[in-house]
Image: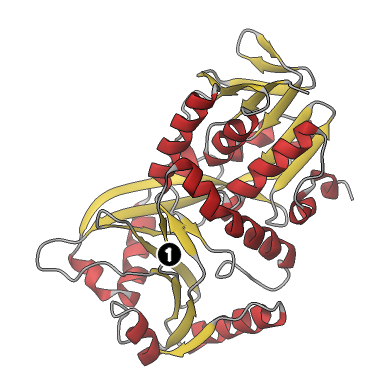
Amino acid sequence: MSHNVVVVGGGVIGLSVAWRLAAEHDVTLVDPTPALGASWAAGGMLAPVTEAWPGEEELLDVGAASLAAWPGFAANLGVDLFTEGTVVAGFDAADTAQLDVVADFLARRGRTVDRLTGRELRRVEPTIGPAVRGGLHVPGDLAVDNRELLRRLTAAAYEAGVAFLRERVRAVRAGAVELAGSALPCEVAVIAAGAWSSGLHPALASAVRPVKGEILRLRARDGTLPPPRHTVRALVESRPVYLVPRADGELVLGATQYEAGFDTAVTAGGVRDLLVHAERVVPAIAEYELTETAAGLRAGSRDNLPLVGWLEPGVLVAAGHHRNGLLLAPITAEAIRAMAAGVEPPAEIKAADPARLER
C-alpha cells in the first residue's frame, strides 16, 4: 500500500530513507539545509570492526550487516568505495594494551584482525611514524567520500520523485508534521533529524543528545610525503584520532568528541589536539596545507545503538546513530522501508527498536 510519507531530516540517514521509500510511496523530505550537518563533517569510515568494544555486541552485528550491504548501495548510487582497509595504531604500551582488548573481544565474536608490531605496521602503511609501538590491520573495513555520497543521494532522491521542502520542523505527531505556521499532513512520518530529533517528539526528549566533533581537512603539498593509503585510526595516550584519505589527495582528520550541547564552533584547542595527536602517528602531516576546519553534532543515544522503529502508529524514528551514521545508512533505510510496508525488517536492526528505552 502506498502512503504519503514525510521524512524529517536531510542528512545521510534522512536522504537514504527518503530515496529508498520513494520507490513505493509519495515522499516529502523536510529540512532547511539538506545534505549538511554532521553528515557533511563526517570522516567517511565504514568500519564496524574497528569501532567495536566489549559490551556493544549488538552494535557490531548491526554494523557488520550494514557493511555487507554497502557495495550494492554504493553501486546503485554510482559512488566509489575505498577498499584498502584500516590500520589501527597504538602509540604507547597502554594504547597497544587497549587494542589487545579489542582484538580479544573480536576473536570471541568470530571476527579476527591481524595484530602487528610497530615495524610490521609500518610495512603495511609506511606513513606510520617510528614512535608507534604496534597495532592492528583490518583489511575488510571500507570508506567513502561522505560529501560525494551526499551529492549522489540528493540527486537520486530527486530522480526518484522525492519532494524537498526547505522548512524548519517544530514537532512531529501522528498524522502531521508541524511547521512554523502550518501542518503538513501525512500517513507516516519518519524522524531522521540527527541530534535535533530530541526536540521533535516526547519519546525522544532524553533519548538522543548532541555530541560535538571537530574535523580538519589537509592536503599534501609539493615535496611532502603522500597521504596514507589506508584509513589510519590510532590511540595516542588513550585519545582517539583518525585520518581518512580521499581520492583527490585530501586527508580528513578527526575526531574530537565533546558533550557541548548544540555548539558548533571550532575551537583552537580542538584543532591543536587533533594536529598534535595525528602528527605523532603520521609525522608527514606537519608539512601539509590545512584547508578546512569544521564541526558537526553526532546524534548520541544512551547505549550507542541507534533508534530505528515505531514511536507510535504513524511515526517512525531513524536517529541516534552517533559515529555510525554513514555505516548504518543502508540497513536503516531498508528497515524503515520494510516497517512502512508492514513487513519484517532485517533481523539485526531489531536491537535498535526504540521500545527498549521504556524497558
Residue 119 location, quadrant: bottom left
220 shown above or below 212: below
Residue 193 location, quadrant: top right
Q: How many marks?
A: 1
The N terminus sits in image quarter: top right
56 shown above or below 104: above
Q: Which residue is mark 1?
A: 83
The chosen color scheme is secondary structure
87 shown above or below 326: below
Identify the residue at image location x=75%, y=39%: 338
Q: Label 1: few (<14), some or many (≥20) within 10 Å?
A: some
237 vs 27, left or right, is: left
Residue 212 x %, y %: 51, 49
In terms of depth relative to the viewer, which is nearer, 196 or 308?
Answer: 308
Residue 99 location, quadrant: bottom right
Which residue in the rendered view is the most extreme toward the left? Answer: 223
Which residue in the rendered view is the most extreme toward the top? Answer: 181
256 vs 108, left or right, is: left
132 vs 102, left or right, is: left
Identify the residue at image location x=45%, y=50%: 42
Residue 204 x %, y %: 74, 38
Check disc 1 and give the amino acid type.
Thr
- Whether residue 234 is visible, yes or no, is no
Residue 134 x %, y %: 44, 87
Q: Element at badge 1?
A: loop
Residue 22 x %, y %: 61, 27
- Whether residue 250 is visible, yes or no, is yes
Identify the residue at image location x=33%, y=85%: 122
